[in-house]
Amino acid sequence: MANANIVQALQHYKSVGVASAVEGASPHRLVQMLLDGAIARVVAAHGCVTRGETARKGENIGMAISILDGLRGSLDMEAGGEIASNLDGLYEYMARRLLEANMKNDPQLLDEVSGLLRQIKRAWDAIPQSLGPQDAQGAVAAKGATP
């Protein structure tokens, strides 16, 4: 019973820590956190495929798709123009590939998506945090993270 309490306390601590980090984060940092979270979920899903943990694989893929949906929803299509449109298409493509990976139990599809996410993350990390969100979308495109 003590172990269950410790696990609950750690989960609560983790959720409070994440909430605190989100509250004080800039929009730039929030996107970084979302990309980190998506990468972590795809990597976890890959491990689940390897271990035959079908339910956990599905949960991780579902969370990664939710994060991608959040990233898509954060795009300013009017101000971001073609760049935002390209990112939108890329996020949508990755979500489709994740669904396919889930159905086929295909770790190579998960590797493809994690590679794309890492590429976007590297470009995003190279952007000075002082740029506004629209400027950051342009900088990501300039770094080659869009199709």
Image (cartoon, rainbow, N blue to C red):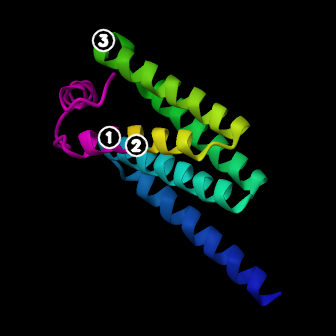
Instruction: Report whether 60 appears left or right of 26.
Output: right
Which residue is farthest right?
1
Is 111 within the magenta?
A: no
Quick one: SS at disc 2? helix
Image spot of residue 50 (x, y percent): 65, 58
Which range is magenta?
A: 118-147
* Foreground: disc 2 or disc 3: 2
Image spot of residue 97 (x, y percent): 57, 31
Where is mark 2, residue-wise?
115
Q: Which mark, residue 82?
A: 3
Image spot of residue 73 (x, y percent): 49, 25
Image spot of residue 125 (x, y percent): 25, 46
Disc 2, disc 3: CB below 8 Å? no
Q: Amino acid at mark 1?
A: Gln
Q: Choose the circle earlier in sequence order: 1 or 3.
A: 3
Disc 1, disc 3: CB below 8 Å? no
Is 134 within the magenta?
A: yes
Q: Write the residue at 76% across / 52% down.
A: 54
Q: Residues within 10 Å of mark 3 (few under 14, many from 20)?
A: some
- Cα gap from disc 1 to disc 3, whole angstroms: 19 Å
Quick one: SS at disc 1? helix
Q: Which mark, residue 119?
A: 1
Q: Amino acid at mark 3?
A: Glu
Q: Write the residue at 40% across / 43% down.
A: 115
Q: Judge whether 87 appears above or below 58 on screen.
A: above
Q: Write the residue at 34% across / 10% down.
A: 78
Q: Amino acid at mark 2?
A: Gly
Check the picture and name the quadrant holding the N terminus: bottom right
The main secondary structure of the magenta stretch is: helix
- Cα gap from disc 2 to disc 3, whole angstroms: 22 Å
Instruction: Report whether 1 appears left or right of 28.
Output: right
